[in-house]
Image (tube, rainbow, N blue to C red):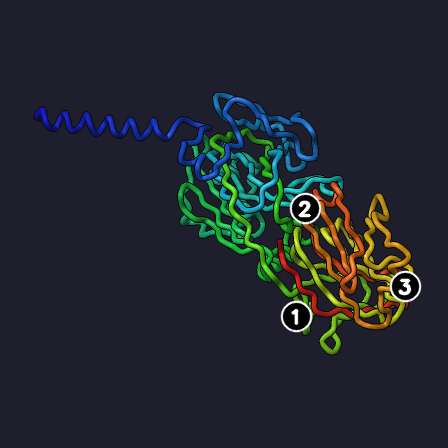
Amino acid sequence: MNISKILSALAGTALLTGAVSCQGGDNTLTAEEKAEGWQLLFDGKTLDGWRDYNGTELTGPWTVEKGMIEAKGDGNEFSGYIVYDQQFENFELQWDWKISKGGNSGMIYHVQEGPEFKYPFVTGPEYQLIDEEHFAEMNDGYQLLDWQRCAVDYAMYIPDLEARIMKPAGEWNTSKIIFDNGHATYFLNGKKTVEFDAWTPDWLARKNSGKWEDCPEYGMARKGLICLQDHGYPAWFKNIKIKELPAKPEKVSLFNGKDLTGWQVYGTEKWYVEEGDLVCESGKDKAYGYLGTQKYYDDFELTLEFKQESDGNSGVFIRSFVPEGVRVHGWQVEVAPVNHDTGGVYESYGRGWLYQIPDEKENILKYGDWNQLRIRLEGDHLQTWLNGEPMTDLRDEKIGAAQGRICLQIHDGGGIKVRWRNLELQEL
């Protein structure tokens, strides 16, 4: 090689070395990434920011070793989960991972906590991390189903399995999830594996007919925690970083005037459409009944009209969820006969009434005629108006921390019939 070629090669090496050094080492962000809004979820040295699922500190089988988060392999399907103590809604999440021979782990997002949820996987979608090649060998011959394989949306969406690029056990893979206002895309080693839209009829059909059919709140949350899983096998993680994406508020009509599309019935009471109105009516069981949206709505302004034809003891639940059966946890904006606090706010579990309206405002309700109810909820600030008159204005930390569905109620006792129309919602 002549001198000019040697100098050229050295210059190229210097440029390459400079390019690598600009990228930084593991568990760091470049100046460009910081400017774009990326955030590290692991500093390479400590597990600061991580804690047990449904806990206040880190006690599970997780350690830091040589710049990696290590799952020791002491967990199982029902234990060994850790979460990062910050909620994310729309995001781009990227991480490097490797798994032990025959190993199984996962990255779960939009995870919810609470006494009703013993395990994170009943609340949030999971990007499956698994060694397919040796799984049967290390697990008594068990053959993975397609919805259990690597880089799937676990038990929901399956990629083109043959098109994936996977590194073997013990080698590093890079995965990415982009969740952008309901549109989800998964990547494995730079190649897209899964793409779907959450909360669509197709998504709901999959959710309600398979592994999650008895998990009513699976995947419903709009925001939540990032969770790592120790599923009884050693696994390692590094370079975990996330960039938040902006929300895109929508304006929607919750009722189409024709049928119950977009809603889900809980209980045996009657919900039907008559002459363009949504009607709730007591059934033979004379029990509680609910009609809930199939999507969560967190910050919004909702206007609707109602007419009480019989008794009229009903209500509009906000940021509510269904732990099981016909039981709703949330906050009810009351709809009831005169002198029963229409427009006030009641908590369905725990504290009871948060606000009852003054007696002098009871005459604002037009019993037997159409009324307009307006509800505005932003963060911890809840306001209600009845026929244009302010009824409730309160701030509540517990409401502020919640998210969930909008549900209409039929009270128990029988004899109730209420009509609803013009349910218009603007997300904030």
Q: Position of residue 403 (x, y in %)?
A: 69, 48
At horizontal 28% and vertical 26% (from top left) the residue drawn is: 17
Q: Secondary structure at mark 2?
A: loop
Which of 313 and 147 lies nearest the eye of the viewer?
A: 313
Q: Relative to residue 357, is residue 175 drawn left or right?
A: left
N-terminal label among 1 and 3 = 1
* Residue type at numbered disc 2: Gly
Q: Marks 2 and 1: which is nearer the front? A: 2
The picture quadrant where one finds residue 71 is: top right
N-terminal label among 2 and 3 = 3
- Disc ID at residue 256: 1
* Residue type at numbered disc 3: Val
* Residue type at numbered disc 1: Asn
Which of 422 and 178 lies nearest the eye of the viewer?
A: 422
Q: Relative to residue 141, is residue 80 drawn left or right?
A: right
N-terminal label among 2 and 1 = 1
- Disc ID at residue 379: 2
